[in-house]
Image: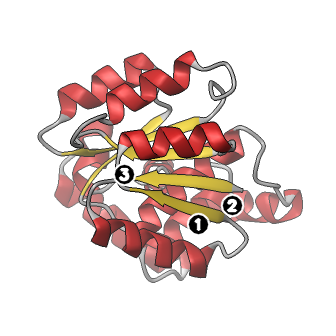
Amino acid sequence: MRILIVDDEPMLLLSLQRTFRVEQPDWDVVLARSGAEALEQLRLQPYDVLVTDILMPGMDGMALLGEVRRDPKLTDTTVIFMTAKDDRDSMRAGMTAGADDYLTKPFTPAELLAAITGRLRRKDLVPVLSQEARASREQVRTLLTERETEILAQIGRGLVTKEIAAELGISPRTVDVHRTNLMRKLGLHNATALARLAIKAELV
């Protein structure tokens, strides 16, 4: 699995790379500091996933997405946007232009990992252990309410509390209560573990 991550913040790039080396050591994660550098990398060899910030000097994420979608050799690349909370207009424009998903900054490396894995699973690039998936789905079906299952799925997508609340039309406080109940019922201790279970259960 080849992942290209693009951002002009070097500390963010290094943090993400360290996480991926631990969590997904078999993945080849390459970093780029600009859209132009990323496009050069993409044209040298194909990548399964491109994760790019929108606001960058020079060639920004929108321009990079346009180049990717116009190039027949790159058009199948999964593209995930990273966007600031006050840049929703660009995010919506990016989704219209062909981005596959987005994450709102600040996010944790685990949330990005969950978002990437979810997108790859939809494209059948991550092998699914059907027995494990069935067991996870049964655990969810047996232990959780319908609303808790919805929230678990949103966590699996990499959404944070405020985004889940907006998506489901409930308050952030209600989301936090459900998250606490999820961890108690499932015997898990953090959002990363919840996201992994959501992915195993094929909720995303």
In the rendered image, which residue does mark 3 sit on?
159
Of the two numbered discs 3 and 1 on the same chain, state the one appearing first in sequence: 3
Q: Is residue 7 above or below residue 57?
A: below
On residue 200, which mark appears? 2
- Which element is circle 3 on? loop
Q: Quadrant of residue 176?
A: bottom left
* 37, 130: nearer the viewer: 37
For the N terminus, the quadrant is bottom right
- Which element is circle 1 on? helix
At 56% from the left and 46% from the top, the residue drawn is: 41
Q: Is residue 139 above or below residue 199?
A: below
At 51% from the left and 80% from the top, the residue drawn is: 188
> Looking at the image, do the residues carrying marks 1 and 2 touch, with CB atoms under 8 Å apart?
yes
Pointer 1 local density, CA inside 10 Å: few below 14, some 14–19, many at least 20: many
> Is 36 placed left or right of 186 in the picture?
left
> Is 78 placed left or right of 184 in the picture?
right
On residue 183, which mark appears? none
* 174, 19: nearer the viewer: 19
Evaluate whether residue 141 shows in this view.
no
Of the two numbered discs 2 and 3 on the same chain, state the one appearing first in sequence: 3
Q: Is residue 72 above or below residue 103?
A: above
Q: CA distance from mark 1 to mark 2?
A: 6 Å
Amino acid under disc 3: Leu
At 54% from the left and 21% from the top, the residue drawn is: 69
Q: Is residue 181 above or below residue 122?
A: below
- Residue 32's x, y, as percent? 43, 55
Amino acid under disc 2: Lys
- Residue 108's x, y, as percent? 35, 67
At 42% from the left and 78% from the top, the residue drawn is: 190
- Residue 80's x, y, as percent? 46, 41
In the rendered image, which residue does mark 1 sit on?
196
* 60, 27: nearer the viewer: 60
